[in-house]
Amino acid sequence: MDPLEFFWDRLLSRSPEQIRAIFKTIDETSQREVLAHLKKMTTEEGWHPEQVISAQTALNVIMKMSNSPD
C-alpha cells in the first residue's frame, strides 16, 4: 500500500486509536495541513457523506488530543 494511502486510510478509519497513532507520526506543519484538509472535507460540498463523517470523526479525536495532557 502507498504510504500516503496508508496514512489517510488510518486517519479516516473512524477508529480513535488508529487516528491518534497515525496523526502523531507527522510533524507539526503536516498536522496543520491535515487539519485544514479535514475541515474542508467537513464544510465544502462535493465530498461523499461517508467521507464527511470520517473526516469529522478524525477532527473530533484530534481536537480531544490537543485539549488533553499527554
Image (spheres, grey):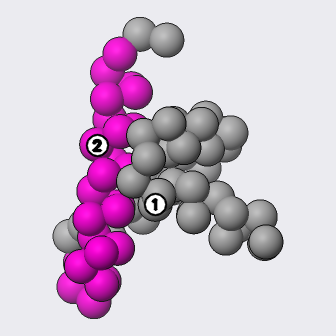
Q: Which mark is residue 45?
A: none
Q: How many marks?
A: 2
Instruction: Determine which quarter of the picture holds residue 48.
Output: bottom left
Q: Amino acid at mark 2?
A: Asn
Residue found at x 35% / y 62%: 54
Q: CA distance from mark 2 to mark 1?
A: 12 Å
Q: Which residue is mark 1?
A: 12
Q: Is residue 43 magenta?
A: no
Q: Residues within 10 Å of mark 1 (few under 14, many from 20)?
A: many
Instruction: Report crowding for label 2: few under 14, some 14 to 19, many 20 or more residues within 10 A (C-alpha).
Output: few
- In the rendered view, would you say 42 is above or below 31? below
Q: Which type of secondary structure does the marked residue at label 1 adopt? A: loop
Q: Is residue 53 magenta?
A: yes
Q: Earlier in the sequence, mark 2 or mark 1?
A: 1
From the viewer's perspective, tell me whether residue 8 is left or right of residue 53.
right
Q: Main secondary structure of the magenta part?
A: helix
Label 2, on which residue? 60
The answer to whether any part of residue 41 appears in the image is: yes
Span colored in magenta: 44-68
Residue 41 placement (x, y as % from top left): 32, 71
Residue 69: x percent and y percent? 41, 10
Q: Are marks 2 and 1 in contact (CB under 8 Å)?
A: no
| Residue 39: quadrant of the picture | bottom left
Kindly identify the amino acid type of the residue bearing the numbered disc 1.
Leu
Q: Quadrant of the N terminus?
A: bottom right
| Residue at the extreme top of the image, as rendered | 69
